[in-house]
Image (tube, rainbow, N blue to C red):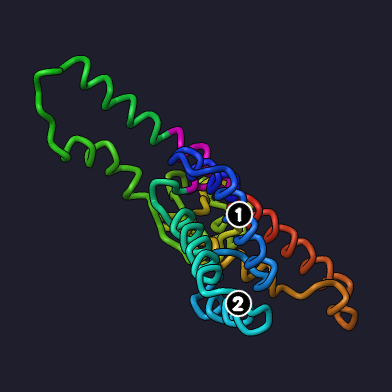
C-alpha cells in the first residue's frame, strides 16, 4: 500500500522529499495505533495528534502536515480507482470471466462499429454469473456448479439448489472469493483468534482443529494484501 501511495504522489509530480516525509508520517501513525489501516478511526488520529501536540510541543503547521499525510493515505486506500482484485480459490475463474466479457465487448466494437450499444448488452453478458452470486459476511459464493460446493459436501446436503454460505470454508472452496468488503472480518478474526498458549487446558484434538482454522484465517487475510 505504501508503494502504491508513493507512486501516486510521484505521478502527480510531488517532490521525493515530500513523498518520503508523508510515508514516514504514515509509518509513525501505524506504529502508534498498532492495527491495520482499514481499522483506523478518526478518534485514533485525534489521539495521536493530541499526544504529539502535548508531549512533543510540535507546531500547529507540523500537526496540520501530519494530519494531511494520514488523510491523503486514507483517501488513496479507499479510492475505488485503486481497488484491489478479489482473492480466494475462485478468484482466478472470476477474473477470467470478466476478461472474457471485455473481449466480447471488444469484438462487438470491431464487428459492428456503427451500432451504438446500450447498457443492456453488458447486462446480458453479466446476468448468468450475477444470478449465481450469493453474498456472505466472510466471502462471496459463485454457485455455478453444485458439484464443486464444498459446503454441500461437508453438510451432506441433498438440497443442491443453493449453497450453505454460512458454512463455507472459503479458503478451500473453488467457488469462493474474498473482496475488500470482507477485509475487516478476516483481519479481526486473525487478531482475536486464540493462540496456542491460551489453549493449554483444551483437548489435543481441539487444539489441532483450532490451529488449522487459525492458519486458514491468516492465509485468507494475507491474500487480501
Residue under numbered circle 2: 48
Answer with left or right where residue 76 lies relative to residue 108: right
The one nearer the camera, 193 or 54, is 54
Q: Residues within 10 Å of mark 2 (few under 14, many from 20)?
A: some
Q: Residue at x 56, y 74 (%)?
A: 59
Residue 187 numbered tag: none
Chain-order first, disc 1 or disc 2: 1
Q: Are marks 1 and 2 in contact (CB under 8 Å)?
A: no
Q: Give left or right: position of 101 versus 47.
A: left
Q: Badge 1 is on which residue?
A: 21
Q: Residues within 10 Å of mark 1 (few under 14, many from 20)?
A: some
Tell me, yes or no, whether the highlighted magenta stretch contains residue 87: yes
Residue farthest to the top, as pictured: 111
In the depicted structure, whether residue 193 falls above or below residue 47: above
Residue at 53% over, 79% down = 46
Observer able to see residue 173: no
**Residue 186 seen by the camera:** yes
Left or right: 214 with respect to 126? right
Q: Residue 5, position in %: x, y?
A: 53, 48
Q: Is residue 224 magenta?
A: no
Residue at x 61%, y 65% (from the top left corner): 36
- Residue segment shown in magenta: 84-96
Distance of label 1 from label 2 (alpha carbons): 17 Å
Amino acid at each position: 500500500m505504501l508503494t502504491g501511495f508513493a507512486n501516486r504522489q510521484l505521478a502527480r509530480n510531488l517532490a521525493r522529499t515530500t513523498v518520503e516525509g508523508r510515508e514516514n508520517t504514515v509509518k509513525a501513525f501505524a506504529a502508534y495505533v498498532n492495527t491495520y489501516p482499514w481499522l483506523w478511526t478518526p478518534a485514533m488520529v485525534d489521539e495521536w495528534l493530541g499526544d504529539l501536540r502535548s508531549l512533543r510541543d510540535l507546531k500547529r503547521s507540523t500537526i496540520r502536515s501530519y494530519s494531511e499525510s494520514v488523510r491523503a493515505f486514507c483517501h488513496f486506500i479507499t479510492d475505488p480507482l485503486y481497488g484491489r482484485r478479489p482473492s480466494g480459490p475462485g478468484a482466478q475463474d472470476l477474473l477470467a470471466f470478466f476478461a472474457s466479457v471485455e473481449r466480447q465487448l471488444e469484438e462487438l466494437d470491431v464487428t459492428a462499429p456503427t451500432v451504438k450499444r446500450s447498457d443492456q448488452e453488458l447486462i446480458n453478458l453479466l446476468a448468468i454469473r450475477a444470478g449465481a452470486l450469493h453474498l456472505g459476511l466472510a466471502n462471496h459464493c459463485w454457485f455455478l456448479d453444485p458439484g464443486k460446493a464444498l459446503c454441500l459436501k461437508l453438510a451432506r446436503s441433498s438440497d443442491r439448489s443453493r449453497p450453505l454460505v454460512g458454512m463455507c470454508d472459503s479458503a478451500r472452496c473453488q467457488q469462493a472469493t474474498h473482496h475488500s468488503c470482507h477485509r475487516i472480518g478476516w483481519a479481526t478474526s486473525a487478531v482475536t483468534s486464540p493462540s496456542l498458549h491460551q489453549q493449554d487446558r483444551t483437548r489435543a484434538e481441539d487444539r489441532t482443529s483450532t490451529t488449522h482454522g487459525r492458519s486458514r484465517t491468516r492465509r485468507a487475510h494475507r491474500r487480501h494484501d
